[in-house]
Amino acid sequence: MSKRIKIKALLESTQTNIEVTVKGWVRTFRNNQFIALNDGSTNNNIQIVVDFQNTDEVLLKRITTGAALSITGTLVESLGKGQKFDIKATSIEVLGDSDPEKYPLQPKKHSLEFLREIAHLRFRTNTFGAIFRVRNSLSFAVHKFFQERGFIYLHTPVITQSDAEGAGEAFRVTNLDLNNLPRTEEGEIDFKQDFFGKSTNLTVSGQLEGELGAMALSDIYTFGPTFRAENSNTTRHLAEFWMIEPEMAFYDLTDNMDMAEALLKYVINHAIENNKEDLEFLTQRLEEEDKQKPQNERAEMSLLDKLQFCLDNDFQRLTYTEAIEILKESTPNKKKKFQYPVEGWGTDLQSEHERYLVEKHFKKPVILTDYPKEIKSFYMRQNDDGKTVAAMDILFPGIGEIIGGSQREERLDKLEQRMDEIGIPKDELWWYLDTRRFGACPHAGFGLGFERLVLFVTGMGNIRDVIPFPRFPKNAEF
């Protein structure tokens, strides 16, 4: 088994007339003579030339689209156009048959909606092969970025008693008998009889636990699954998604913005350098998709140009207050084109507003800072004006918010006052408040939704297409 060479390595080879063994899945088989074989290491197939006159007819019939083969043969320079090498097969073994009548992935164009229904097989298409190789590369680059800067990778819990965002959109975790729930005298569910002795849920963020790590280890990051029970059927929301959440001691808001911008540029650059072939394929795919759209809806830049543009430009930084003024005076607001009109200070910005700032006004990524405290979480550091907090959101073209972060409130009295104001029970977060009692220091952090990053880098239009098995309302298939 270990003798096999991956097709990507073979196509980059400089040797010919050597014996090689490849294994993969049949994409097409033409004229009983030419097999296009793919093993997922690259979108490019290798062509296998079969000596059909001297090959058993029963074996030839088993070479169908989707079948898994092991092939040994001689690597030769190709005589055909579009490929560098062929393999002249000397032995062919069928490792797994594929019934051509039943195999859902025929060699033709399939819609993304159809492919979502067969997510277990969609990895075998060029589009999804490219997406998941890019996703892998971005994931590796995230770790590389933080490890090179001396960060500690901290695994925060998936099961927790806290709802970090205070939004109440968490999935309950229980092992109580749902047909016979124990009740207290008041008629409430008696969670003392549950596994953890308290009400617990799947994490919505590893941030609060991440802060605890940063208060001893200085710089930490988490990178794991998070869950939101939000009944949202949009192209940008998932019920289960991956989050990158660094927390840095002795950082203020400016340091936080610098770190977030550096991270985004680093991982995008890593993908450009290491996934050129896949990104070129996805760029071409997007251009073909764009041709079907009316002229005014077409992208102004190609995917690769857009990625390079993010690397070449400093992100535009401005306050929420400045952004509100721009939006209030904007043509779409005056002409009532926004679904949510911007009436003034205190408006919670929607995706359409964020995208206007990025795509129409500044035409580059934007970092918004100093939001009204009423529309932000309790843990954000309160500014001296008494109205705003030291928050920052990074907005990207086509996506809207890709990163949300803040300097954290390190002053115990201010934090407790804010928790009282919005009704967060202090006794449940006693451990969090302890970090403000014992050696508190200025610190900051942010959250990057990994799927939104993959969405941006691959140019895909739906977040369900950049995670292997999407979880959304009424769907937990596979």
Image (cartoon, helix red, strand yellow):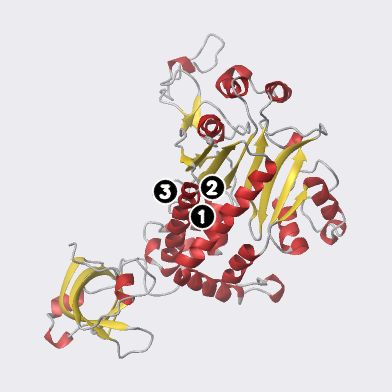
Residue occupying image coordinates x 68% and y 74%: 294
Secondary structure, mark 1, is: helix
Residue carrying label 1: 464
Q: Which residue is mark 2?
A: 238
Q: CA distance from mark 3 to mark 2?
A: 14 Å
Are there few (<14), some (14-19), or many (20+) residues within 10 Å of tag 1? Answer: many
Say whether disc 3 or disc 2 marks the residue closer to the N-terminus. Answer: 2
- Position of 208 compared to 319: left or right? left
Tell me the amino acid under the disc marked 1: Arg
- Residue 110 in view here: no
Question: Percent from the top left, x then y, of residue 9?
Answer: 31, 71
Q: Are marks 1 and 3 in contact (CB under 8 Å)?
A: no
Q: Earlier in the sequence, mark 1 or mark 3?
A: 1
**Distance (Cα) linking label 2 and label 1:** 7 Å
Is 383 on the left or on the right of 264, as rendered? right
Element at badge 3? Answer: loop
Q: CA distance from mark 1 to mark 3?
A: 12 Å
Q: Amino acid at mark 2?
A: Leu
* Residue shown at 22% from the left, 74% from the top: 63
What secondary structure is found at the residue carrying circle 2? Answer: loop
**Mark 2 or mark 1: which comes first in sequence?**
2
Instruction: Classify residue 23 as left or right of residue 433.
Output: left
Which residue is identified by label 3? 477
Seen in the picture, residue 169 relative to 474 is either above or below; the reply is above
Give the quadrant of the N terminus.
bottom left
In this view, the residue in front, 235 or 242, is: 242
Q: Position of residue 306 (x, y in %)?
A: 62, 67
Looking at the rendered structure, the kind of residue marked 3 is Glu
Few, some or many residues within 10 Å of mark 2 (<14, 14–19, 20+)? many
Give yes or no for contact between labels 2 and 1 (Cβ–Cβ under 8 Å): yes
Q: Residue at the location (41% across, 21% down)?
A: 195
Q: Indicate the quadrant where residue 440 lies.
A: top right
